[in-house]
């Protein structure tokens, strides 16, 4: 019996995810430029031709990896009504987002290692900046309602604090993770 369109799409998504996971591991370990498409294919257990069936280039794989992280982060955020955002809503969003750090610190470690590579900065930096600008735009009204005329610095400080907590948890596995997160929420959400 032939496969349905849905089954074919599911197989395609699974293969793309497999390729992206293999590429992320290699990019984080060896670097973007030092990793070949052949190595990605070997790690993923697929042919080089199949990779090019799904991605035009190694750069497209990198872009898909970065975009997939943003999509995951967006899922919780986009459910918020940012015009009617309450402190409880923002706290809940932050807690859900930070659960990923505790659930899968290894994947986050690979993302941090990938982002820190200077040879891909020209690819990743505009994507990260665009994502941050979107968060600033979405959170801006919340802080303006709190009387902060220029919310950009406080939003960037919140994001920086959460990134720092994530990085330190990945490196040091702080047992006080929840206490530190509570402190960040108290200072940046309930001001």
Image (spheres, rainbow, N blue to C red):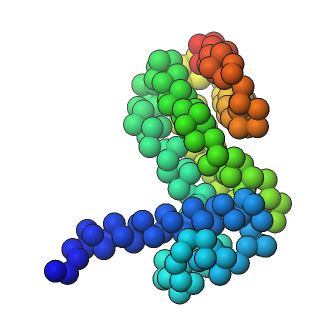
Give 55 or 110, whichever is nearer the viewer.
110
Write the residue at 42% across / 65% down. 14
- Quarter of the N terminus within the rendering: bottom left
| Residue 16 locus on image (x, y percent) | 48, 69
Q: Quadrant of residue 146?
A: top right
The residue under the point 67% across, 51% down is 111
Q: Percent position (x, y) of residue 81?
A: 41, 31
The percent coordinates of residue 182 (x first, y second) are 62, 16
**Residue 34 versus residue 86: which sits nearer the camera?**
34
The percent position of residue 105, horizontal first and vertical second, equals 63, 41
Is 49 on the left or on the right of 106, as rendered? left
Instruction: Give the quarter of the image for residue 83.
Output: top left
Quadrant in the picture for residue 29: bottom right
Residue 171 in view of the camera? yes
Asked whether residue 152 appears in the rendered view, the answer is no
Left or right: where 156 falls relative to 82: right
The quadrant of the image that shows the C terminus is top right
Please count the marks in the image.
Answer: 0
**53 sits to left or right of 114:** left
Which residue is farthest left?
1
Question: Image height check: is 1 above or below 103?
Answer: below
At x 54% / y 32%, what residue is drawn? 99
Relative height, residue 16 to residue 101 (above, below): below
């Amino acid at each position: 019996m032939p496969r349905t369109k849905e089954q074919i799409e599911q197989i395609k998504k699974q293969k793309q995810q497999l390729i992206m996971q293999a590429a992320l591991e290699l990019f984080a370990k060896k670097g973007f430029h030092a990793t070949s498409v052949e190595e990605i294919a070997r790690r993923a257990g697929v042919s080089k031709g199949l990779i090019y069936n799904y991605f035009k280039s190694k750069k497209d794989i990198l872009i898909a990896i970065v975009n997939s992280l943003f999509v995951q982060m967006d899922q919780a955020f986009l459910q918020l009504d940012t015009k009617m955002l309450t402190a409880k809503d923002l706290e809940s969003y932050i807690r859900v987002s930070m659960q990923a750090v505790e659930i899968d610190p290894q994947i986050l470690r690979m993302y941090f290692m990938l982002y820190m590579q200077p040879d891909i900065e020209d690819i990743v930096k505009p994507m990260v900046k665009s994502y941050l600008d979107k968060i600033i735009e979405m959170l801006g009204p919340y802080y303006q309602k709190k009387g902060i005329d220029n919310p950009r610095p406080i939003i960037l400080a919140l994001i920086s604090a959460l990134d720092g907590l994530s990085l330190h948890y990945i490196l040091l596995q702080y047992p006080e993770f929840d206490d530190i997160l509570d402190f960040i929420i108290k200072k940046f959400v309930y001001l």
